[in-house]
Amino acid sequence: MIYRVSYISDTYKVKGYLALPYGMSIDKETLQLSLHQFYDRTDLEVEEIACPLHHPHEDVQRQRLAVLVYCRGGIGRVGSVRATWLERFAQHGQLVFAPCYRGAEGGEGWDQFGGADAQDVQSALDWLSTLSFVHASRMSLMGFSRGSVNATLAAATWKQRELDNQDGENGIYRLVLWGGVADLALTYEERIDLRRMLKRVIGGSTGKYPERYEARSPVALAPQLACPVLIIHGEQDQQVDPGHGKLMRERLEQLHKPFAVHWYEHYGHHMPEDVHKQAIARMFDWLQGPA
């Protein structure tokens, strides 16, 4: 089951997708009530957008599920949340949530490429951690491409609220950076085609506002990370140079942070379907493996 939900981030009503593991279901009204109660708003919609051919037979409220928050790449309509990815992720037994980022898919506000829009991830984590069927100490993040910025910001700064259903560590369990940007200033130099957009959403160039680019760079945020990190990258990636993955690996190594690397020598930013499914399975093996 996949739902598109409205939730609140700062003062904006934004959109996100919630995917349940295969065979599990929840009443749309129950999901909507949880949003209304948490955000104290009655105008938050829940829309069922995908349902398996066979009717789900397990009530998710009887479960206690780990969570993966998938931070999409791109901006606006470019690189929007991929429903096929949600389906593939949800087949591995975790609850999956994907923020659309403000300004996208009818959401209010505007995307600042890891600026104020980073709150969209944190607000979703706040709500998800209150759900009775969520394992609140097993909440992980996956950032794809530019989504690595939003995911790393959340992993570095998010703390759970004091809640009765919480146990374990008070933060993110694990972080995955898949084809992820590590240094946004480096992206500015490498991707001439993105410079105009970056100057527009960030307010200027790397020369004018170096601190804004640094604040959006996972390598700069690495000292604040308290969770293990998995780097997934393709050696043939032409959209986010593999140097970003290597740079992040070197930084984590310098800081003696726990990390793992899944390197795909013959593939780029996007993989063939069969390889992608294998990479996802390998990622979930790491997510579910021993600490």
Image (cartoon, rainbow, N blue to C red):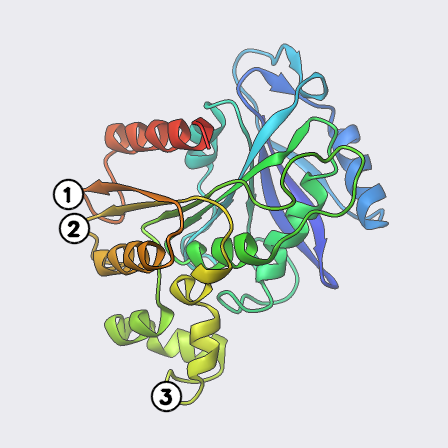
Q: Amino acid at mark 3?
A: Gly
On the image, which quarter does residue 167 sit in?
A: top right
Asked whether the residues under the numbered discs 3 and 1 touch, taking CB atoms below 8 Å apart as contact, a structural biologist would say: no
Q: In whole angstroms, how far apart are the C-alphas of marks 3 and 2?
A: 29 Å
Disc 1 marks which amino acid?
Glu
Describe the element under mark 1 as helix, strand or loop: loop
Q: Residue 221: x and y, percent?
A: 46, 63
Q: Mark 3 vs mark 1: which is more N-terminal?
A: 3
Quadrant location, the N terminus: top right
Residue at disc 2, secondary structure: loop
Expressed as whole percent of the image width and height from the top left, the position of residue 243 reads 22, 60
CA distance separating discs 1 and 2 = 7 Å
**Circle 1 residues within 10 Å: few <14, some 14–19, many ≥20:** few
Who's the residue at 46% across and 68% down the image? 216
- Mark 3 sits on what residue? 207
Q: Is residue 57 visible?
A: yes
Residue ID at (53%, 19%) = 22
Looking at the image, tell me whether mark 1 or mark 2 is earlier in sequence order. Answer: 2
Which quadrant of the structure image shows residue 134?
top right
Q: Contact, CB < 8 Å: mark 3 with mark 2?
A: no
Which residue lies at the image location 39% right of the left edge and 84% below the top edge?
A: 205
99 or 115: nearer the viewer = 115
Q: Which residue is mark 2?
A: 236
Q: Residue furthest left?
A: 266
* Amino acid at circle 2: Gln
